[in-house]
Image (cartoon, rainbow, N blue to C red):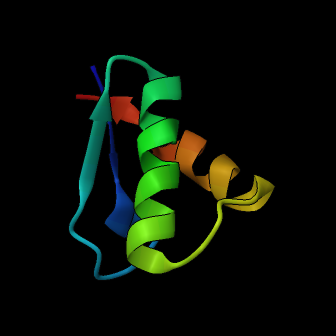
Protein backbone atom coordinates (compact mmCIF):
# COMPACT_ATOMS: atom_id res chain seq x y z
CA UNK A 1 0.00 0.00 0.00
CA UNK A 2 1.22 3.48 -0.92
CA UNK A 3 0.13 6.77 0.64
CA UNK A 4 0.42 10.45 -0.26
CA UNK A 5 -0.44 13.31 2.07
CA UNK A 6 -1.67 16.27 0.04
CA UNK A 7 -0.55 18.68 2.74
CA UNK A 8 3.06 17.78 1.87
CA UNK A 9 2.51 19.75 -1.36
CA UNK A 10 -0.54 21.93 -0.61
CA UNK A 11 -0.21 23.52 2.84
CA UNK A 12 -3.33 23.12 4.93
CA UNK A 13 -4.84 20.18 3.02
CA UNK A 14 -5.41 17.20 5.31
CA UNK A 15 -6.35 14.66 2.64
CA UNK A 16 -4.47 11.36 2.51
CA UNK A 17 -4.69 9.36 -0.69
CA UNK A 18 -3.92 5.63 -0.74
CA UNK A 19 -3.54 2.99 -3.39
CA UNK A 20 -2.07 -0.42 -4.04
CA UNK A 21 0.77 1.14 -6.01
CA UNK A 22 2.15 4.51 -7.07
CA UNK A 23 0.01 4.66 -10.21
CA UNK A 24 -3.19 4.15 -8.20
CA UNK A 25 -2.14 6.97 -5.87
CA UNK A 26 -1.38 9.26 -8.81
CA UNK A 27 -4.84 8.59 -10.27
CA UNK A 28 -6.42 9.48 -6.91
CA UNK A 29 -4.25 12.61 -6.67
CA UNK A 30 -5.40 13.73 -10.10
CA UNK A 31 -9.08 13.37 -9.14
CA UNK A 32 -8.47 15.14 -5.81
CA UNK A 33 -6.47 17.98 -7.36
CA UNK A 34 -9.19 18.71 -9.91
CA UNK A 35 -12.14 18.38 -7.51
CA UNK A 36 -10.75 20.01 -4.38
CA UNK A 37 -8.07 22.39 -5.61
CA UNK A 38 -9.31 23.23 -9.11
CA UNK A 39 -6.03 22.34 -10.79
CA UNK A 40 -5.00 19.85 -13.44
CA UNK A 41 -1.75 18.16 -12.42
CA UNK A 42 1.17 19.14 -14.62
CA UNK A 43 4.61 17.52 -14.83
CA UNK A 44 5.94 19.60 -11.92
CA UNK A 45 3.09 18.61 -9.62
CA UNK A 46 3.30 14.94 -10.61
CA UNK A 47 7.03 15.02 -9.86
CA UNK A 48 6.42 16.58 -6.45
CA UNK A 49 3.81 13.93 -5.68
CA UNK A 50 6.05 11.05 -6.83
CA UNK A 51 8.81 12.33 -4.53
CA UNK A 52 6.43 12.17 -1.56
CA UNK A 53 4.58 8.88 -2.08
CA UNK A 54 5.49 6.58 0.81
CA UNK A 55 4.74 3.09 2.04
CA UNK A 56 1.62 3.17 4.12
Residue 1 lies in quadrant: top left
Quick one: 33 or 11, which is closer to the camera?
33
- Residue at coordinates 34% horizontally, 68% vertically from top-left? 7
56 with respect to 54 (left or right): left
Q: Is residue 37 above or below residue 32?
A: below
Toward the right, the furthest residue is: 43
Residue drawn at the location 42% of the way across and 18% of the way down:
21
**Looking at the image, is 39 positioned above or below residue 19?**
below
Q: Splitting the image into 4 quarters, where does residue 44 fall? A: bottom right
Q: Position of residue 8 (x, y in %)?
A: 39, 63
User: Can residue 52 be seen at all in this image of the molecule?
Assistant: yes
x and y, in percent, of residue 37 in the image:
45, 77
Q: Is residue 21 left or right of residue 45?
A: left
Q: Residue at x 48, y 64 (%)?
A: 33
Q: Residue at x 29, y 45 (%)?
A: 17
Dividing the picture into quadrants, the one containing residue 6 is bottom left
What percent of the width, then of the height, locates residue 41?
65, 60
Whether residue 14 sits left or right of residue 51 in the image: it is left
Would you say 34 lies left or right of 6 here?
right
Amino acid sequence: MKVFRCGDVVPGCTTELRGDDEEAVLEAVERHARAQHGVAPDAELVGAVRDRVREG
